Image (cartoon, helix red, strand yellow):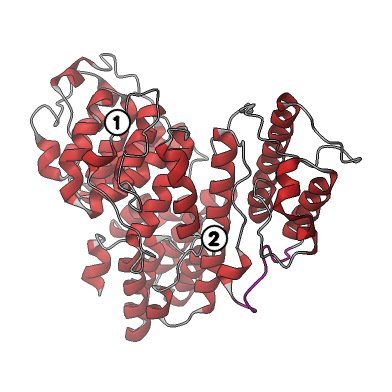
Amino acid sequence: TGTGTGTGTGTGTGTAAAASAGGNNFATSGQESEATNDLELLAKSLLECGELRAAASALSSLPISSNDPSSAAGPANAINGGASSTAAKAARAAVAIGGGRIGGGGGTGDSSGDLVMGPPLPGLSALGTYLRAYSLYMAGEKRREEEMVELRDPLDRGTSRNAVLPQLASELYIPYVEGALDAFGLYIYGVVLKALRSSSSPAGLTTRSPTSVMRHDDGGGRGSDAFPPGGHPSAHTVLIESVLLYPYNWSAWLDLSGLCIDDPAIHPDVEDRLRPISGHWMYHFFCVHVFLENQANENAVSVIERLVNGNSARDPFVAGGAAAAGGASGDAEIQQQHPDGMFGRSPYLQSQLAVAQYNLRDFDEAEAHFVALSERYPDRLDQMDVYSNILYVKEDRVTLSALAHRAVRVDKYRPETCCIVGNYYSLRGRHERAVTYFQRALKLDPAYLSAWTLMGHEYVEMKNTPAAVEAYRRAVDINPRDYRAWYGL
């Protein structure tokens, strides 16, 4: 989660916490700050244990309209730091851990009522703000996925939404304007805005042009006039601010790349804003990912070779290839980066290079990279399902069998393993058995694109056209740029 260590703000807001069995009152701002730190550590521990709602609840005030018996103390006691706040906080955490309802309201199946949370506790540090927002967002995503499992109609699955997104957007707006969010707080705010943007009913979300949400230089804050009231910054603007503060958060880069791929109109703005770190190696990794998603495989190969081999490789950014591919471009100064090829033994880059060669239909070159990768890292399963596709196309039954046995020995419950074994049975003509393994892969990861596409191929072989159509449709829902699924459909 990238939480790291955090310190309290010491603002003297009087926040109380369940820090002692006797429910002592905290009189000084230093003790109040220490209590806030204790709550943040509690939330961090609960988050790492997978107790998402409990983690968010630990850093939230009691909802005024809550049906929780512990809410009788009222929000005022939570702010004043009385002993009743300790009992209320402990009771609410116990309800959350036990699976009870936070905030009341709504009948059975009412996802929005189940996830109602009070506002954030006053005096939270940047770490606390991030922990609470991330925990609440993930709790909403978990509930959304549970609802999708119960929906059988594919059209109904597209209407399932994360019910906490509007609440999170409104709560993160104020600290964003005040410049109180760190890199990870900006990241989760950008994720929330991205999810609202992709929603067909964004609950009144309005965004402003990128120029209206530029960070002010008046001490780090934006001021109340950073953008008009009621408007949110664009998702890509917030994510760029996050990676500028901390370039090593790969999750932020991935979300930013998704926005770039879905909306080519933001490319010039993204390129311009990322120019201060255009020579950073994380920026190059980001470009490789965007190129591969856009099927600009030649440009991806060129960037990877520069990262692996140094300046002896051609850089497509200098030649202007990035803008044509729909990615982010850099400067001529990139030629001076990594003169010795600092990523010469990176397994990630070698696997990406193999995938690029596979997309270019150069199966021999891609297989050579996968063989070398398997020899250096025999326990690595990432992208090995692509290797199994190559072996399937080349009808190399012996090597595919050895790969399947090795994958099962490493981790039989990885989606990649199930996909490899499914390819093996498909090559042997046992299509029903292959479908079984592709279904296992989807139980482990419902968004596993390759399994949906390959299962569609198997249903075609089995003359089960309706099932094949459904599998291909699920694949293109996950990634509309997957030409294999479109071709099969």
Q: Please state which amino acid type lies under the numbered disc 1.
A: Tyr
Sort mark 2 into few (<14), some (14-19) or many (20+) by Cα contacts within 10 Å.
many
Q: Please state which amino acid type lies under the numbered disc 2.
A: Gly
Residue 474: give x, y in percent of width and height. Answer: 36, 71
**Which residue is painted at 22% across and 27% down in the image?**
275
Q: Are marks 1 and 2 in contact (CB under 8 Å)?
A: no
Q: Is residue 109 left or right of residue 449?
A: right
Q: Is residue 403 visible?
A: yes
Q: Which residue is mark 1?
A: 283
Q: Quadrant of the N terminus?
A: top right
Residue 129: give x, y in percent of width and height. Answer: 56, 40
Q: Is residue 81 left or right of residue 394?
A: right
Q: Quadrant of the C terminus?
A: bottom left
Image position of 198 with respect to 45: above or below: below
Picture quadrant where residue 73 is located: bottom right
Number of the front mark, 1 or 2:
2
Q: Which residues are magenta?
A: 99-109
